[in-house]
Image (cartoon, rainbow, N blue to C red):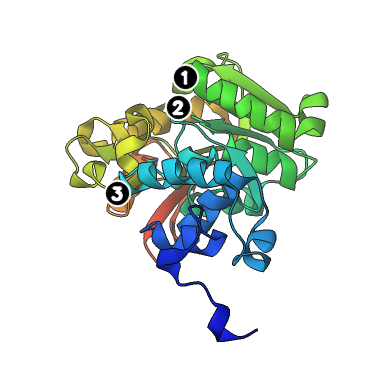
Amino acid sequence: MSGRWTIAPALGPATPSWDRLVLASGLPRLEARVLLEHASGRRREWLLAHGDEIADARAADAFAGLARRRRDGEPVAYLTGSREFLGRDFEVSPSVLIPRPETELLVQAVLDRALPGARVLDLGTGSGAIAISLACERADLYVVATDRSPEALAVARRNAQRLAGQALAGARLLWRAGSWWDALDAQDRFDLVASNPPYIGAGDPHLAQGDLRYEPQQALVAGGGGLDALREIVAGAPRHLRPAGWLLLEHGCDQDGALRALLAGAGFESIQTLRDVSGLPRVTLGRMPE
Ligand code: GLN
């Protein structure tokens, strides 16, 4: 191709190329590509292979709207309505926390300890990421998941229909509405209980930054400097765990000491803290006596 015929950008057509949309968006390249995929309905590979072709006008308009909202701060996951967690795409909406890679550590810690046929509880499931991942990874597990938010449970049920239909059909994945232990019957017992509860203290400056500004406060913020939900979960756990059952909790990176003390006070043994992908204390677990 001869350079003589290259059209200068300023003289180009009204609708720019796919690549130009990405470059001119003012967004990090990867974010812009994710939003362009969503706006165009085209796969990433197609967009990369056809990057210098003129974008279709409807997709360009939709992309411009999404890019503007992203520049104003809205999370990419809420703009596209999905986020990947442990290799599966979960529907998300502003009624649920956006699943984070740190929480994959919690799921892995449950999988490492769950004996065949174990009954597992996920307290405060949100999008269902933890419960559904467990049910998908292990066809032998029985999983119960709770949330007090009807909107969150609706999102979780849709994710389960799409990702874990077999577990639903086999009654290996069940939902309960209610706050923490209130969602369960007094006689319900589990081999493992996992939770990623709200653990950020009210007034924490992180709440005014990034995605947290758009996420549901009730999934993020807890009283008592961020420890109240963790405290309530630890306090109720001995009544709902079988002998030698595990409690596994995600928490803030400066809460591991407090949580180990709470677990010890509630009679847990074999207490330990696991570090997340960034090397920070993130999951603390303990076991009921035999
Ligand atoms: N992990 C989230 C964050 O700090 C908080 C989630 C939570 O409170 N459970 O970004």
Give the mark nearer the N terminus: 1 vs 3: 1
Q: Nearer the viewer, residue 188 or 36?
A: 36
Q: Report the amino acid beneath label 1.
A: Ser
* Identity of the residue drawn at 44% across and 19% down: 179
- The Cα atoms of the two marked residues, 1 and 3, are separated by 25 Å
Label 2 sits on a secondary structure element that is loop
Label 1 sits on a secondary structure element that is loop
Assign the C terminus to one quadrant of the image: top right
Residue 158 against residue 136 in the figure, above or below: above
Q: Which mark is residue 216?
A: none
State how many labels appear. Answer: 3
Circles 2 and 1 in contact, beta carbons < 8 Å:
yes
Q: Residues within 10 Å of mark 2 (few under 14, many from 20)?
A: many
Left or right relative to 165: residue 108: left
Determine which residue is flagged by label 1. 149
Ligand 1 picture quarter: top left
Residue 200: x and y, percent?
Answer: 28, 40
Determine which residue is flagged by label 3. 255
Assign the N terminus to one quadrant of the image: bottom right
* Identity of the residue drawn at 29% across and 49% down: 255
Give the mark nearer the N terminus: 2 vs 1: 2
- Can residue 222 be seen here? yes
Mark 3 vs mark 2: give the one in front.
2
Circles 1 and 3 in contact, beta carbons < 8 Å:
no
- The Cα atoms of the two marked residues, 3 and 2, are separated by 26 Å
